[in-house]
Image: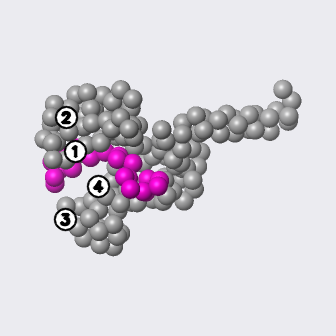
Amino acid sequence: MKQVLVDIKKCLGCRSCELACAVQHSKTKNLYQAVQESPHPRKRIFVESTGDGSFPLNCRHCDDAPCAAVCTTGAMRKDTSTGVVANQPEKCVGCWMCVMVCPFGAIATDGEKHLAVKCDRCPGLEEPACVAACPTGALVYQEVDSFAKGVRKQFLADFLREEGGNL
C-alpha cells in the first residue's frame, strides 16, 4: 500500500501542500472560488515548524487505527481494500474521541460542520493533492519499502562522501 511519506531535508515549510489539500476538498476545486466558499474548505495536512525545520504531517492510516477503534458511531472506518482510514460525515457526531486518540494529531475538527476531518488520500486522484503540489518533492506517494530503500541509499552515499570513500 502506498503512503504519503516525507523527505524532511527537502521541506521548506512553504505550506503549498496545505493549500492544495484545502482546494482539493473544496466544492469548486478552484483556489479563487474556494476562498469564497462557506463553509470554508479544510486542509487535512499540517505543516509544523520549529526553528530547526518544518515537517508536513497527515494521517498515517494506521494498520491498527486507534481513531476507528474508539469511534462510537462507526463513522471512522478503515477500508480493507485500500487501507485508507476515512470518516463518513453522515455518521460523525463530533464527539472528538478520534482527535483525542490519534498519536500524530492528524485529525482536525471542522467547527462549521461539527465533523472530524482527516486525510482521505484524495480519492479519484492518481496521487494526493499535497504530493502533487510540493515544489521540492519533499512529499512522495510510494510504497514504504521503496521509500526506505531510497533513504538507505542516500545515507550510504552521504556516509561515503563524508568518509572520503573509506569504509
Answer left or right for 96 relative to 129.
left
Q: Which residue is mark 1?
A: 88
Residue denoted by label 2: 74
| Nearer the camera: disc 1 or disc 3 | 1
Residue 157 visible at all: yes
Residues packed near mark 3 inside 10 Å, few (<14), some (14 to 19) or many (20 plus): few
Question: Circle 4 is placed at which residue position?
Answer: 42
Q: CA distance from mark 2 to mark 4?
A: 22 Å
Coordinates of residue 18 in the picture (x, y in percent): 39, 55
**Label 2 amino acid?**
Gly
* Gap between marks 2 and 1 measured at Cα: 8 Å
Is 72 displayed left or right of 12 in the figure?
left
Marks 2 and 3, the one that precedes in the sequence: 3
Q: Please provide the residue range marked out in magenta.
A: 110-130
Q: Residue at x 33, y 30 (%)?
A: 65
Of the numbered discs 2 and 1, the one sitting upstream in the chain is 2
